[in-house]
Image: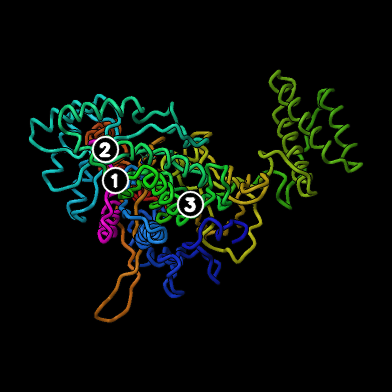
């Protein structure tokens, strides 16, 4: 497990058991040994019991561990409670979950349920998210906040006002100055007093990809001047008492406590100024940004890691707000945060299997010698080959590798001019791979694209299930779920099912090839015939599901929930494994592109009838059954052969 740094990024939720399988510790530090969940064994058993239906093992699958979600919420709440207590802070902490991180119904409903004891609320950034949040919060705490962020039109504002009628504490957070008129006019005509918040554009900024939203040139929020204008207008309209909340967002993955203190401190001073200007301020909403240590390096200067714990984060926020309020003589407000990735990342594990392995030529022990080819090589290549042989003879493998590269490039040039046969080119390529293999085995550093042994083809679409790896180079820990008591001897890169060269993963958590916390390959085991080899992608519970697209029409994977259920009558607990969402079928993804499967089936049926005009009735029936079957089958690779079987009937 040290190879994959599981303890570094996975603690306290993931570890490896004596059988060499990855286990989940659903209650974090409070998990007892007999409560650990062996993912591999749980999946195998669920398949045996047919709990997972037809989807699995033929498609990737999202496993959700609601107990982890609960633990994350409680960890955040208790970190703030402790920091508040330790520093005698006079306000309380009351968080909200930004639903954009994961809008899946089971996730949102669980957050509302688990967060009810401490009045946890929701944040929405669009009309659809607002409706979702409104209906979910109806069964939550009556004190929970509903923070309405994002750009707003009249309908958005009207919905947020309507939420007040439902006794929800909906705060309309102004992102733009123009939104104020909408709020004033609609609240007057609907006779509903609004709760108003302002989103401040801070000067504080963090570097890196996720800092783009912050700073003076950031996309969102109101400048100091706009804030002053809004206060004046609200005062003129006798609505200054409605202004009660200040919101800001420094950016996701805040790298260090100093950046955090800097941002919160600036915002806290704005908060105090607003209070002293006569607004009825109650709450400072510090936005998201609590980071996740994806590579376990605890390194402050990387988007993939953060240099603090949740407890340290909470202490810094409390301190920054307290310092500003003390200085300006303002009552200490309720602290609200919109942590997203820190809440939901850990509780989801994406499981997928390897469909085949393509060994790189030159890496296998029984690799054949380069092909024997008739005919002579063009002179320049022949000379390079002689140089190459001499370099290998004297053991200068580094130069041999460079020379082999020249041979390869020169051969391709000659092939394009028609001066080299395909057999010759194949022979040169084999020779190149052979030398690369030998050179590497002798410990010479290779360029990243050559420093792996095999390409493992995975039953997955990266664009669908881990889009951030492609879009922003996000690193998610990927680990075999089994055989971790066996040395993983193969260095692989992963290639997905899409017909897209970007559909591959060649950066991993680890130490190999890239110095610090990254690897250019994933250590895996040789595949064994007829045995499935599962990989798990961890920490991917935030953003990936909503951002994922249907490139090549690979559909959304099914979702399976795994949790311990109390059986009161027997005073025992049972592990409950249940499918909470089916995977998308071919029919489902076609509908996303405005195709109508039943009409398509009809068209195909007519075409079939025309072409089989004089054929057998059974033949037509089998073909129709096969087509029918294919519409309702998985978009991923499958060994089910349901379509083929229907045809071979
Ligand atoms: N709140 C706002 C306004 C955001 O823009 C974001 C994300 O960018 C979040 C909350 C969630 O941030 P994170 O997932 O980093 O906690």
Question: Which residue is painted at 40% across and 56% down in the image?
Answer: 347
**In the rendered image, is residue 597 in sight?**
no
Seen from this angle, which residue lies furthest bottom?
Answer: 570
Element under disc 1: strand
Residue drawn at (40%, 54%), measured in percent from left and top? 348
Point out residue 619 in the picture as x, y percentages from the top left corner.
30, 43
Which of the marked residues, 1 or 2, is nearer the chain's N terminus? 2
Question: What kind of element bears circle 2?
Answer: strand
Badge 1 is on which residue? 283
Residue 52 x %, y %: 34, 59
Tag 1 and tag 2, C-beta contact below 8 Å: yes
Q: CA distance from mark 1 to mark 3?
A: 37 Å
Cα separation, mark 1 vs mark 2, equals 9 Å
- Residue under label 3: 537
Indicate yes or no whether the magenta region holds residue 95.
no
The residue to which callout 2 is attached is 197
> Along the horizontal axis of the image, is 450 left or right of 166?
right
What segment carries the magenta color? 103-128
Q: Is residue 40 above or below residue 326?
A: below
Q: Please tell me whether residue 106 belongs to the stretch shown in magenta.
A: yes
Coordinates of residue 286 in the picture (x, y in percent)? 37, 44
For label 2, the crowd category at 10 Å Cα-Cα, with few meaning under 14, some 14 to 19 and many 20 or more, is: many
Relative to 195, is 165 on the left or the right?
Answer: left
Precedes in sequence: disc 2 or disc 3 = 2
Displayed-image quarter of ligand 1: top left
The x and y percentages for residue 490 are 65, 53
**Which sits in the foreground, 284 or 219?**
284
Residue lying at the far top of the rendered structure: 417
Inter-mark Cα distance, 2 to 3: 38 Å
> Could you say which is closer to the camera, residue 520 or residue 163?
163
Instruction: Pick the residue in front: 272 or 158.
Output: 272
At label 1, counting other C-alpha atoms closer than 10 Å, the crowd grade (few under 14, some 14-19, many 20 or more) is many
């Amino acid at each position: 497990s040290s190879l994959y740094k599981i303890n570094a990024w996975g603690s306290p939720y993931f570890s490896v058991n004596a059988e060499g399988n990855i286990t989940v510790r659903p209650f974090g530090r409070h998990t007892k040994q007999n409560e650990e969940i062996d993912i591999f064994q749980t999946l195998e058993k669920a398949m045996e019991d047919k709990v997972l239906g037809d989807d699995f093992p033929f498609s990737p699958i999202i496993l959700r561990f609601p107990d982890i979600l609960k633990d994350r919420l409680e960890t955040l709440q208790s970190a703030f409670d402790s920091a508040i207590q330790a520093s005698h802070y006079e306000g309380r902490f009351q968080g909200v979950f930004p639903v954009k991180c994961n809008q899946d119904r089971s996730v949102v409903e669980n957050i509302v349920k688990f967060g009810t004891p401490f009045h946890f609320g929701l944040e929405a950034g669009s009309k659809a998210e607002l409706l979702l949040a409104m209906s979910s919060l109806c069964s939550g705490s009556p004190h929970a906040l509903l923070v309405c962020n994002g750009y707003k039109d009249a309908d958005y504002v009207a919905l947020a006002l309507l939420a007040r009628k439902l006794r929800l504490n909906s705060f309309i957070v102004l992102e733009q100055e123009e939104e104020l008129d909408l709020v004033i006019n609609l609240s007057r005509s609907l006779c509903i007093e609004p709760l108003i918040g302002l989103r401040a554009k801070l000067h504080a900024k963090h570097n890196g990809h996720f800092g783009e939203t912050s700073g003076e040139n950031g996309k969102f929020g109101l400048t100091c001047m706009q804030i002053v204008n809004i206060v004046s207008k609200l005062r003129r309209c006798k609505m200054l008492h409605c202004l009660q909340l200040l919101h800001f967002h420094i950016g996701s993955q805040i790298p260090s406590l100093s950046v955090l203190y800097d941002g919160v401190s600036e915002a806290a001073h704005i908060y105090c100024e607003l209070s002293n200007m006569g607004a009825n301020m109650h709450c400072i909403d510090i936005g998201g940004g609590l980071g996740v240590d994806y590579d376990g390096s605890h390194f402050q200067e990387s988007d993939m890691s953060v240099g603090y714990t949740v407890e340290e984060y909470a202490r810094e926020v409390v301190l920054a707000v307290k310092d500003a309020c003390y200085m300006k003589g303002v009552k200490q407000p309720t602290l609200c945060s919109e942590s997203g990735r820190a809440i939901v990342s850990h509780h989801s594990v994406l499981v997928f299997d390897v469909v085949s392995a393509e060994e790189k030529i030159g890496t296998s022990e029984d690799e054949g010698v380069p092909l024997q080819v008739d005919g002579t090589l063009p002179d320049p290549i022949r000379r390079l080959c002689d140089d190459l042989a001499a370099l290998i003879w004297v053991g200068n493998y580094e130069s041999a590798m460079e020379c082999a590269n020249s041979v390869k490039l020169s051969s391709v040039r000659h092939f394009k001019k028609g001066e080299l046969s395909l057999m010759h080119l194949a022979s040169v390529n084999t020779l190149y791979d052979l030398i690369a293999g030998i050179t590497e085995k002798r410990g010479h550093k290779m360029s990243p694209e050559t420093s792996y042994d095999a390409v493992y083809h995975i039953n997955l679409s990266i664009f669908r299930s881990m889009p951030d790896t492609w879009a922003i180079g996000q690193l998610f820990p990927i680990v075999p779920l089994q055989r971790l008591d066996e040395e993983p001897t193969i260095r692989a890169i992963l290639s997905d099912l899409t017909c897209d060269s970007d559909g591959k993963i060649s950066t991993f958590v680890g130490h190999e090839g890239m110095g610090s916390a990254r690897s250019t390959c994933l250590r895996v085991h040789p595949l064994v015939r007829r045995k499935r080899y599962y990989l798990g992608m961890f920490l991917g519970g935030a953003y990936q599901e909503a951002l994922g697209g249907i490139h090549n029409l690979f559909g959304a994977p099914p979702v399976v929930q795994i949790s311990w259920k109390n059986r009161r009558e027997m005073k025992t607990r049972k592990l409950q494994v249940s499918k909470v969402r089916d995977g998308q079928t071919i029919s489902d993804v076609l509908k996303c592109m405005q195709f109508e499967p039943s009409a398509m089936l009809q068209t195909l049926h007519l075409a079939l009838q025309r072409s089989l005009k004089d054929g057998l009735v059974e033949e037509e029936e089998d073909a129709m059954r096969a087509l029918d079957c294919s519409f309702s089958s998985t978009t991923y690779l499958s060994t089910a052969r349901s379509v083929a079987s229907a045809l071979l009937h």
